[in-house]
Image (cartoon, helix red, strand yellow):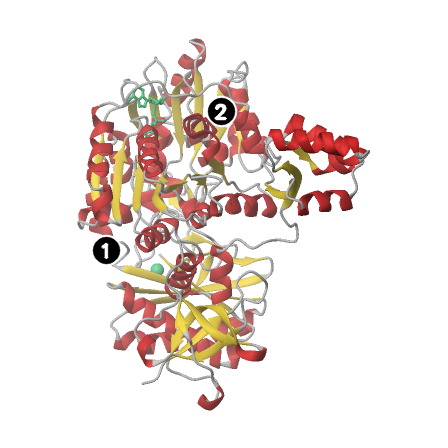
Amino acid sequence: MELFADIIIDISHNKLDQTFQYRIPPELQNVLEPGSVVEIPFGRGDRLTKGYVMRVTDIPSCPLEKMKQVKGIVTDLVGGDSKLIALALWMRDYYGSTTVQALRTVLPFRQKASPKKKKTVVLRISKAEAEEKLEFYKKKHQSARARLLEALLEEGILPYEAVTGSLKITSSVLKTLEEQGVLTCESEQIYRTPAMLQRLQGEKTGQDTFSLNGEQREIVEAIGKEWDSCGFAQYLIHGVTGSGKTAVYMELIEMALLRGEQAILLIPEIALTYQNVIRFYHRFGDRISILHSRLSKAERYDQFERARSGDIDVMIGPRSALFTPFQKLGIIIIDEEHETSYKSESIPRYHARETGKKRAMLEKAKLVLGSATPSLDAYYEAQQGEGRLFRMTTRALGGSLPEVCTVDMRKELKEGNRSILSRTLSGKIGECLEKKQQVMLFLNRRGYAGFVSCRSCGHVIKCPHCDVSLSLHKNGRLICHYCGYEEPSVSVCPKCGSPFIGGFKAGTQQIEEMVKRAFPDAGVLRMDADTTKGRDGHAEILRAFGNHEADILIGTQMIVKGHDFPHVTLVGILAADLSLNAGDYQASERTFQLLTQAAGRAGRGREPGKVVIQTYDPENYALVCAAKQDYESFYNQEMHHRALAGYPPAGDMMAVHCASENQQQLEIAVDYLAKFIRQIAKKRQAVVIGPADEAVAKVNDIYRKAIYLKHKEQRVLTSIKNLVEQYVEINSGFQEIMISFERK
Ligand code: ADP
Ligand code: ZN
Ligand code: ZN
């Protein structure tokens, strides 16, 4: 069977969607793959041109006699684009997207702003020769040349503008002297320096002065020992908050640099971890660059160019820093690997952990994941023997874990307290304020999808098929966002008959008002999407609280990440159940992570910390394990549930998202699609769930529905995805429907 290659000639412009098909000669049939760089005859005169293979197929797109043939494969490339293209094509095939969408995600494109250049004039002859020439010019009354040479003898290099400006040298004089070899005019690229880097350059403190402790050294030595022999390798560091993972990362990065290799460090959000970034800057200085969400496209492009040219060796940033075009990437470190910000919301919906692993494999680099609460996915892989697991169990600066107590809010109600604050929490806040200590109140709203629960007995109304909570819709019905199951809402609890059943309504603002009423003398700050809108909103609130300008900080999940406030001795978690009943299969995992992190905020200074968890479901294993900071036990129980229901990582799951402005058309198309998917899934023994409305069923007047698929093996879902892609492409009924995929 003859094979053909779809090839892109130019990856630098907006011509990505122009592929050209070539025949693959027999000797290259098993050699060429997506990402290969080839030589092909192209254009008038069939000039040999470099091209990138996007796809290998056995279906010719035009008559064979009209098709040209690939000339050869280019193998002597140093690092660079070929591997990034291969990565993009893997993302296309695994996550589902067009080639262009994938390439645009991975390759930084030069935007309209072209890089800035700085022009200089450089003396190219020895001092003695220059002095001799200077005498000669003077004697000949060539005063312009004399003036220039005098200045160059003094400085060696002059800015071009100064030469043509204040020295008044014409370009023809410069040209003559350049031809004689006296000087050269050079243009050096200057990169736009992002404000964050400029600010870092001014930071004075932050150098680590300690040496590694036993736990840290063990990890560094173990990884170092197999560095050169193993090519790709994967590690997971499960280290409690404050155990000193950052110092380990720095040592590992150093190891890469010593070998002439480069490093990428992913962190969830720079604004929240600025203190740590300073530590890196002090260790590696100008070898570092930083990406973050507020960089302009041009600034971002420049930082990637610096990496490409070898100007820097370490890139720190969010998930997109993964695509930094280093020449010889040695290590990818993903800190707080469990964070949801590592998953992209735009197509291809890639996850930095999986994609980082793929890149590390392509580059034969190391992948290091770190977390105090590893994702089930990462921990499961480690349990399966994919990569080594390290544990860090003690805080590097000493200090004990906080004392956690769980308050049963059902009992509060029974005893007559209908407030959002339990008596225990109120009492402890009072004590704290008296001692001039600080309090954080965390409203766990993450993923809140309007479940219905009973405040008397804690009963939550769940889907009888999917093991997730039902969400209350405006039309008064309870709906499952996986399978679409519906039932009418209730006014009394089906379990205990209490009338106190309904959705949880309090937001951070109501809590703020209530806390101010209860503690009129306390300074209260609130941090949520509303109060952090400005450019530095976030940082400003954190700074004020850090300086003890307020006593109580109220906020959503933003407040539990990364900050060290030594005067905080009490953390109150309001409505721990909100995230527990978020209506998706990861609800317990997210809750465990958030509670463990929130608890880790208390008592970072000398005073021991206290944590109060308020809940209607105190026996829930996610809460019990978080209160005990017992990851292992949480993992085992959660994996048990996942295995029973076939949810990842026990099996693979994929969503097919469908969206359209036309609700009626969407309904019809989704029904057809579901029928088709059921047909092909049946043959492969995959489970189809839905279709159902998405958790947010309408965004900007676009209606959204989803179909879910489950199967033990990834490749089965990938093959179903490919068939769906083909089906959608050839069926005109889907033209107005946006269809995309999401791996779970
Ligand atoms: P993690 O990232 O694991 O939460 P960090 O790396 O931020 O922890 O370390 C917590 C604190 O402990 C930091 O203030 C750090 O400077 C300090 N630290 C880390 N390692 C050591 C060590 N070996 N000796 C003394 N202090 C350390
Ligand atoms: Zn009840
Ligand atoms: Zn369901």
Badge 2: how crowded within 10 Å, few (<14), some, or many (20+)?
Answer: many
The vertical placement of 411 against 232, above or below, is: above
Marking on residue 553: 2
In depth, the one of 689 and 7 nearer the eye is 7
Q: Specify the farthest residue to the top.
A: 435
- Label 2 sits on a secondary structure element that is strand
Q: How many marks?
A: 2
State the separation of the CA atoms marked 2 and 1: 39 Å
Residue 463 appears at what percent x and percent y? 34, 56
The vertical placement of 437 against 81, above or below, is: above
| Residue 534 visible, this orientation | yes
The vertical placement of 164 against 642, above or below, is: above
Q: Quadrant of the N terminus?
A: bottom left
Residue 30 appears at what percent x and percent y? 30, 74
- Label 1 sits on a secondary structure element that is loop
In depth, the one of 307 and 475 nearer the eye is 307
| Residue 459 visible, this orientation | no
Q: With 431 as the anchor, is 290 left or right in this view?
A: right
